[in-house]
DNA sequence: ACGTCAAGACGGACCGTCTCGTCTCGTCTC
DNA sequence: GAGACGAGACGAGACGGTCCGTCTTGACGT
């Protein structure tokens, strides 16, 4: 009855897939999230609309995949610095994160992704699993190392530590409620470590 | 709802204004943000579309005003509890906030507003000034009282304290990255107070 | 009389679906 | 192997929808 034949992955055109993902990223950073339409992506990629609808269920999924592809390219830079000084390492990382957020080139796509995630629980789950998850694990690994070195309370809830470190930064950026200075990043690290010191 | 030179404000129909704002809130909590269109609002409110476009510049502005009206009604309940025990008071408030977020009736409109704010800097500024600002001031007043009672470091940056208290909660809810239990709210308060204790 | 009002027509942008005819494949036959 | 065949993905774009933001109409209130 259901002639809902699923597409055959092995016959998929890698060229079209890349073109669509590249066009998506280009359009988002050029004209912004709101004005990026499926039609525009298809035209830019030199692709039929059906080729997009065949492989992705929604605009959010396309945006998500264009991100996933980007992060997979930069897989190597996943390891966080571990000089033995947790506070110094965290300050370095949080300052870098703050600087990234300040760059419009990075900011626009992340806002686009955030917008989709807020209104699509399924996409949110995928985001946590495939993008945020691995990064958070790397961060928690560094915290655990600090824990073993006695720079963090042994019973500290690492998920909570992570949230207290990053959530204020994310929120300040997302809602544009304040400046993202290196001093702010430092204050965040200092306060969080004070809360969870051994 | 900013600078309207052309239309004559004194002739504006209060009945239509209320009907539009009420219909907006009703639609958002019924069918969700994405499916709430200006046309649907006009039909629901029994109002011509032009009456909306005459007084509001965008869908985001209508949504924002429907919120503003709501918060102005509940102006009285702005004062936070002050029993003298800062930790207990904060736990009470954060638990209540967590419970509010868990209620779909509240959640949907706040997500809608958040979506608009992320992609509209001007709306974000208005949000901070007219909605978040006063609430944050009330919260900071309670923190200041705790500071004077010696329950918080005298040199604590109250903006930072506020962010460390609320941002993790907001982020967890916005991205659905974890449960919002009373225990979580308590842990957040305890960790934050530990970071800023005298 | 004037300006706002409800109602809705209008052109335009995109949506998601649906053909087209073309271009790749793997398979089957000789 | 070589050529014919068929399944299915492809680019292109027409189609009926929804919603946008503007514009027109006639009723109503002051």
Image (cartoon, coloured by chain):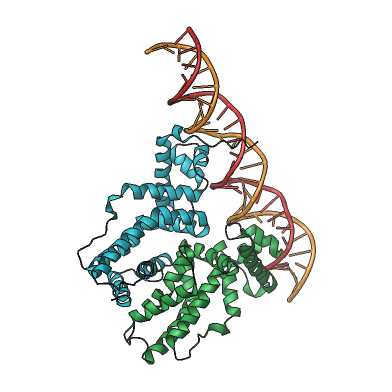
Chain colours: A cyan, B green, C red, D orange
**Most foreground residue, B161 or A196:** A196
Q: Is residue A84 left or right of residue B57?
A: left
Note whether C19 is above or below A147 in the view shown: above
> Toward which corner of the image does residue A22 lie, by quadrant?
top left
**Most foreground residue, B131 or D29:** B131
Q: What is the x, y in percent for residue A69?
A: 38, 46
Residue located at (52% from left, 77% from top)? B96
Q: What is the x, y in percent for residue D18?
A: 64, 51
Total labels: the figure holds 0
Note whether C20 is above or below B154 in the view shown: above
Name the quarter where the C terminus of chain A is drawn.
bottom left
**Most foreground residue, B75 or B16:** B75
Residue located at (60% from left, 57% from top)? B35
> Toward which corner of the image does residue B186 lie, by quadrant?
bottom left
**Most foreground residue, B133 or A54:** A54
Residue located at (40% from left, 88% from top)? B146
Q: Is residue B128 visible?
A: yes
Q: What is the x, y in percent for residue D11?
A: 47, 33
Q: What is the x, y in percent for residue B118?
A: 46, 63
Q: Is residue A76 left or right of residue A124?
A: left
Name the quarter where the N terminus of chain A is drawn.
top right
Q: Is residue A33 visible?
A: no
């Amino acid at each position: 009855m259901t002639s809902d034949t699923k597409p055959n992955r092995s016959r998929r055109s890698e060229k079209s897939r890349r073109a669509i993902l590249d066009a998506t990223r280009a359009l988002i950073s050029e004209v912004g999230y709101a004005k990026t339409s499926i039609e525009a992506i298809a035209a830019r990629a030199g692709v039929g609309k059906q080729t997009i609808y065949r492989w992705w269920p929604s605009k959010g999924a396309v945006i998500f995949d264009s991100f996933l592809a980007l992060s997979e390219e930069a897989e190597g830079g996943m390891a966080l610095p571990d000089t033995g000084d947790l506070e110094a390492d965290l300050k370095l990382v949080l300052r870098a994160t703050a600087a990234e957020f300040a760059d419009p080139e990075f900011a626009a796509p992340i806002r686009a992704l955030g917008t989709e995630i807020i209104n699509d629980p399924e996409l949110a789950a995928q985001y946590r699993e495939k993008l945020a998850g691995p990064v958070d694990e790397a961060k928690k690994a560094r915290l655990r190392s600090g824990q073993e070195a006695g720079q963090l309370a042994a019973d500290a809830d690492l998920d909570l530590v992570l949230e207290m470190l990053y959530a204020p930064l994310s929120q300040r950026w997302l809602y544009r409620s304040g400046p993202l200075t290196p001093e702010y990043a430092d204050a965040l690290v200092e306060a969080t470590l004070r809360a969870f010191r051994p």
